[in-house]
Image: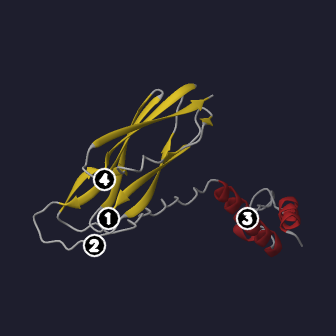
Amino acid sequence: MSAWRVRRYLEQSRPRSCTPQLNSGALDDQSATPVSLRSAATCWLATLLFTSGCNRGHQRPPPRSSPPPIAVPHSRLIPPGTRQVPAAIARVRTPAQIALPDSARVGDSIPILITTYGGGCIWEDSTEIAAHELRADMRPYQRVPDGRGLVSCSAEIRVNERMAILTFGAPGLATIVVHGRVMEGDSVVSVSRSVRVH
């Protein structure tokens, strides 16, 4: 028998009161007529089911646990004894390479791919972004030895790429300026790119 039919049967067969009914003509306690065993069991079971059904509807759901934090490791560990410098985004005979879409919609994520140049003792660091209306200034950084310790560096040139995401909230011609340095000589360089936001 299904739960609905059991509940329906108990509702129909449940007496109005679970207390013994007294005979109207009784003069002593022996003349009192208690409810039958079947009626008492039915009443008790019906009350139990109805009460549990009401309480079930008011139970609070268990609190949701917050997801654990996600740690993003560095692709290359940075040793101690380093200092932050503007990233090398160009070389003497190699102009800056900055890739981005020609156009985007308002509110869309715009990926900016910046190429940087490093070496045996040059480590990639963070990218600072300052955006205001339709202009964004990006400053990628690298880390080099601070000169206070003995460091053995390999003579090599490494080409690295880093991705940054920009979003513009108004239509128009957006200007993106990447500030860095030339690898040979450490001269400062700024490169501008544009994207049409519609």
Residue 53 shown left or right of residue 187 in the figure: right
Is mark 2 in CB contact (under 8 Å) with mark 3? no
Q: Nearer the viewer, mark 2 or mark 3?
A: 2
Give the amino acid at mark 4.
Met
Q: Is residue 70 visible?
A: yes
Give the amino acid at mark 3.
Leu
Q: Which residue is mark 1?
A: 119
Q: x and y percent of residue 198 in the render?
A: 63, 28
Alpha-carbon span between mark 2 and mark 4: 16 Å
Give the amino acid at mark 2.
Ser
Alpha-carbon span between mark 4 and mark 1: 10 Å
Q: x and y percent of residue 113 in the render?
A: 49, 50
Dot placed on the residue nearer the N-terminal end, 2 or 3: 3
Residue at the image point whose x is 57% and y is 55% from the top? 60
Residue placed furthest toward the left: 148
Query: Nearest the camera: 95 or 142?
Result: 95
Q: Quadrant of residue 145?
A: bottom left
Q: x and y percent of residue 155 in the render?
A: 29, 70
Alpha-carbon span between mark 4 and mark 3: 79 Å
Q: Which mark is residue 49?
A: 3
Q: Which mark is residue 183?
A: 4
Is mark 2 in CB contact (under 8 Å) with mark 1? yes
